[in-house]
Structures are given as C-alpha cells and as structure tokens.
Amino acid sequence: MAACVLALLPSAWTHAVAEDRLRTTADVPVRDVAVVFGAGLLGERPTPYLARRLDAAAELYRSGRVKVVLVTGDNSRVEYDEPDAMRRYLTQHGVPDDRIVSDYAGFDTWDSCVRARKVFGVERAVLISQGFHIRRVLALCGAAGIDAYGIGVTDTHDATWYYGGAREVFAAGKAALDAALKPDPKFLGREETGVSDALAAVAD
C-alpha cells in the first residue's frame, strides 16, 4: 500500500499544481504567446490529436487572446519534422506565418518548457495539449519559470486517449525528477529572438 501511495504522489503533485491554472479557449487570460506541444505525425501531417491542439491555438489567435504561437516538437531526423508540419497546419487555418515561431528541439515536455523559457525568452504563456497531458505540462513549465495557464483540448475517449491517460501516471514520476533536478535539455543551444521579433512586428 505504501508503495502504491508513493507511486501516485507525482501524479497528485501535477494535479495540485495545475488545478487553478486550467482554462478553455473562451476564458483563458490574454497572453502574448501560446505554446503548442508536438503529438506526432502521420506522414507529413499532424495526427488528429496534434491537429486539435493546433485548432485551439488558431482559435486563440483569431480571437485576439494570443499574438504569437510557439510550436515545439521533434525534428531529430531529416524525415521527421513536427514543427514545420505544425506551422503549415496553422497557416492553413488563419495564423500568419510571421506569427509562428518554431522550436525544432522540443524532444520531450521538459525540454520544450526549458527551451521556451531559456532559448525563446517566454515568461508568460498559454500552454496547449490534451486534457490528460496538460497538468504535467503546467507543472513542468511552472518549474522552468513560465507563468502559464493551460488548455486541455477534448478528444474522443478512444484507445489512444486511455493509453495517454495511463502513461501520465508513469510520466509524472519523471516530471517530478525533472522539476526537482532541473536538468539541461538534450539540446539547449543559444538564445533565439524569434518570439520577441514576432511580438515586435505585431506592435509596429
């Protein structure tokens, strides 16, 4: 019983940290930047789960709740490019190309959060993911120094959804370690001005 309690503590932590930071596209506070986390590709197109995240970001942009969208995902090999696929989808749904910034080294949630803060200079943001993932996103980005609200998009409760929910119980353990130890991302790199440049263009 004690082992079960200990195993569930990290998951309880993510829920406690995120509870008052969950919003919808209709009531999320206005922020300059939305961050969309990768969720896989089908060929060169976003998976349905990723498409729904991008739909939420496009809705926030069109409603004026965000000015810039940072897409963060995996481009660790030439034939797999999540950020560019995400960019194409957003431009097809009404987000201007110069309002989209790409992070090509968002290899996992912690890396994406740290890079958003340290590389792209994001201090306040709206974070977008699936409902089963968004609490961990909020907890990790908070640990990385980002003041954020999160939107957990809804999905049909299919096999993928149940797998994602079950996976979160185990992923929360790694998240707790990342938040406590604050390791550097797999690839940190130099600071980039994409977000600040895009925001400056909005202001001009």
Image: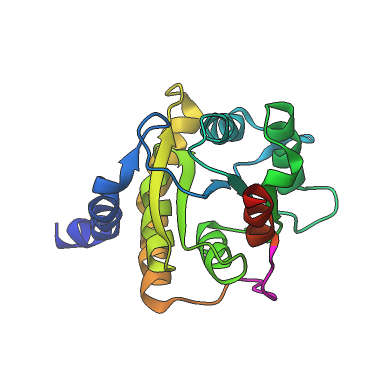
- Residue 118 drawn at (x, y percent): 56, 71
Q: Nearer the viewer, residue 197 or 73?
A: 197
* Segment colored magenta: 186-193
**Colour mode?**
rainbow
Horizontal placement of 134 versus 7: left or right?
A: right
Which residue is drawn at the image coordinates 43% and 46% (left, top)?
167
Q: Is residue 189 visible?
A: yes
Task: Write the residue at 39% across / 29% down.
Answer: 26
Residue extending farthest to the right is 78
84 and 11: which is toward the camera: 84
Residue 187, position as x, y percentages in the image: 67, 71
Q: What residue do we see at 69% from left, 59% from top?
A: 197
Q: Is residue 16 magenta?
A: no
Q: Residue 1, percent across and down?
A: 14, 56
| Viewer-proximal residue among 125 and 182 | 125
Taking 47 as reference, is 164 left or right? left
* Relative vertical location of residue 13 with respect to residue 94 in this rendering, above or below: below
Q: Residue furthest left?
A: 1
**Could you tell whether 156 is left or right of 176 in the image?**
right
Can residue 73 be seen at all in this image of the molecule? no
59 relative position to 130: left or right: right
194 over 21 or under it: above or below: below
x then y, percent, for residue 71: 63, 48
Query: Magenta: predominant secondary structure element?
Result: loop
Residue 124: name its quadrant.
bottom left
The residue that appears at 38% across and 67% down in the rendered structure is 143
Q: Residue 190 colored magenta?
A: yes
